[in-house]
Image (cartoon, rainbow, N blue to C red):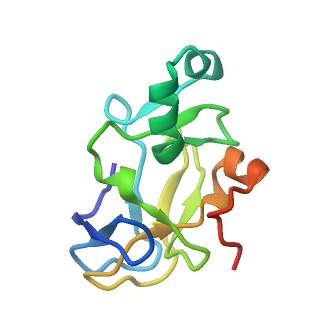
Amino acid sequence: MYTVPVTIKKSSINGKGVFAEVPIKNGEIVWKFKPGYDITLNQSKYNALDLHEKERLSHVAYFSPWTKRWVYPPEGDAAEYTDHSPNNNLTVVFDKSVSPEPYFVANRDIVSGEELTNNYLEFDAITQKERPKWVQLS
């Protein structure tokens, strides 16, 4: 769940994106897994999903190399629209004392109105392994 005010609007990267509504300081937690709100599945529960749900999750979920679980926001949450960029302004951190799943911090100061982006290669085991064509490396 985003911990800062965000809005969803047209992105120059891909369709819709997530944009900061306020300035964000370098090192500030921007997204953190919220138990009871965000969702995790083990591999066997993921395997039991129908093809429609797996297709939806291919766009919004990641497979955590730390916890070996699928992690994703509830349908309609802003995190569904966080775009990939090799010049990302959010970076992943895993510290169990802060969150049971990886969380994201600003890796530099971010201005209000700027799109929030991740580099999926930092935290998604499937993207790391399969390197889809849309993943830019630099």
Q: x and y percent of residue 122 in the render?
A: 66, 60
Direction from residue 96 to residue 117 in the image, left or right: left
Q: Quadrant of the C terminus?
A: bottom right
In the rendering, at what x and y percent does residue 106 appear?
Answer: 46, 72
Depicted 22 relative to depicted 42: above or below: below
Q: Residue 136's quadrant in the figure?
A: bottom right
Extreme right residue here?
A: 129
Is residue 7 visible in the rendered image? The answer is yes
Is 2 situated left or right of 63 in this image?
Answer: left
**Residue at position x 32%, y 55% in the image:** 2
| Residue 102: image location, x then y, percent | 55, 48
Give the residue at x 38% y 36%.
Answer: 38
Which residue is at a point 45% across and 28% down the rendered structure image?
53
Which of these two is toward me, 43 or 14? 14
Whether residue 98 is visible to the viewer of this picture, yes or no, is no
Spot occupied by residue 108 in the image (x, y as percentages of width and height) = 48, 82
Residue in view at x 51 percent, y 42 percent: 61
Quadrant of the rendered image containing residue 7 = bottom left
- Is 132 above or below relative to 117? above
